[in-house]
Amino acid sequence: MTDPVFFADGSELNGASAGEEFVLAGAEARHAVTVRRLRAGETLDLVDGAGKRAACEFVSGEKDTMTVRVVSVTQEPAPATEFVLVQALAKGDRDLQAAESATELGVDRVIPWQADRSIVRLKPERAAKTLAKWQSTMAAAAKQSRRARWPELGEHVNSSGLASLMQQESGTLWFVLHESSAVSWDGLESQELSGAESIGVIVGPEGGISDQELNRFVAAGARPLKLGHEVMRASTAGPAALAALCALTGRWA
């Protein structure tokens, strides 16, 4: 079984080196000591979310402080191709489920999208609280999946803002998942995908993407794409597409 992962701020972890002891305080240490109940000699990883991983041995802990001995420190490189998930807000926390699963599958950036047909509306007075919940969910998923490099949570956008973002990031291959598209995964060339610096997948809400939105996104450079014969829920489509991309681009090689 792989070692549990705990977050350590990059400014602190930068000073860690093999053979030295490192003290971590706060919520992460409390979780290790009181929830995981780590004991002397057990192994764990400390990560900074930006690719740095310190393999450690637990020395001691009390309440919200733990001391570990650093065994090795490595810097994991960023993937050759960035994966971006644009996830429409959806009811029943299905949008959160999508962000969580996408994190476990290696997504590099998640952008919450207020689609025209989103039942959930991101009100200004609640936006900060809602996005904090997304951030917390993604952080927990990153630790669960033992990631050293954590995904970025982008600013939430409406459909106009998303079209503008696509135009600004014209080097990204943008795909709009749409059940009526004539192009399926079979029509994609793995060479084109693996050679891309960034690939973005856009997933609509329960009510689907409106014709106006689809036309706007196509005009901004996106390509409609049919994921499969079945119509998936908002929580499933994005992670399913990311899994397919992991296979097609060689991430799972």
Image: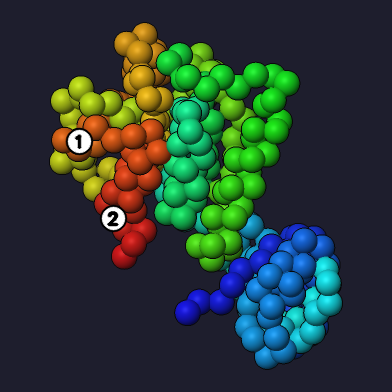
Vertical position of residue 131 compared to residue 107: above or below: above
Question: Disc 1 vs disc 2: which is toward the camera?
Answer: 1
Residue at 63% x, 77% y: name it.
Answer: 44
Vertical position of residue 220 compared to residue 45: above or below: above
- Horizontal and vertical percent position of residue 209: 36, 19
Instruction: Please name whichever residue, 47 or 15, is drawn nearer the observer in this view of the structure.
Output: 47
On screen, residue 244 versus residue 43, left or right, reads left
Q: Quadrant of the C terminus?
A: bottom left
* Sequence-earlier tag: 1 or 2: 1
- Horizontal and vertical percent position of residue 112: 54, 31
Which residue, given by chain and number where applicable, does mark 1 sit on? 230
Q: Are marks 1 and 2 in contact (CB under 8 Å)?
A: no
Tell me the crowding category of disc 2: few under 14, some 14 to 19, or many 20 or more residues within 10 angstroms, Cα based: few
Q: Which mark is residue 54?
A: none
On screen, residue 183 versus residue 176, left or right, reads left
- Horizontal and vertical percent position of residue 232: 29, 35
**Residue 204 lies in quadrant:** top left
Question: How far apart in space, not on screen, are marks 1 and 2 (Cα)?
Answer: 20 Å
**Residue 83 lies in quadrant:** top left
Instruction: Please name whichever residue, 183 or 112, is drawn nearer the observer in this view of the structure.
Output: 112
- Horizontal and vertical percent position of residue 32: 70, 72
Query: Is residue 113 at all visible to an observer of this figure?
Result: yes
**Residue 46 lies in quadrant:** bottom right
Instruction: Please name whichever residue, 249 or 135, is drawn nearer the observer in this view of the structure.
Output: 135
The amino acid type, in three-letter code, at marker 2 is Ala
The amino acid type, in three-letter code, at marker 1 is Glu
Tell me the crowding category of disc 1: few under 14, some 14 to 19, or many 20 or more residues within 10 angstroms, Cα based: few
Instruction: Please name whichever residue, 46 or 248, is drawn nearer the observer in this view of the structure.
Output: 46
Residue furthest to the bottom: 41
Residue at 55% x, 57% y: name it.
Answer: 142
Which residue, given by chain and number where applicable, does mark 2 sit on? 247
Residue furthest to the top: 212
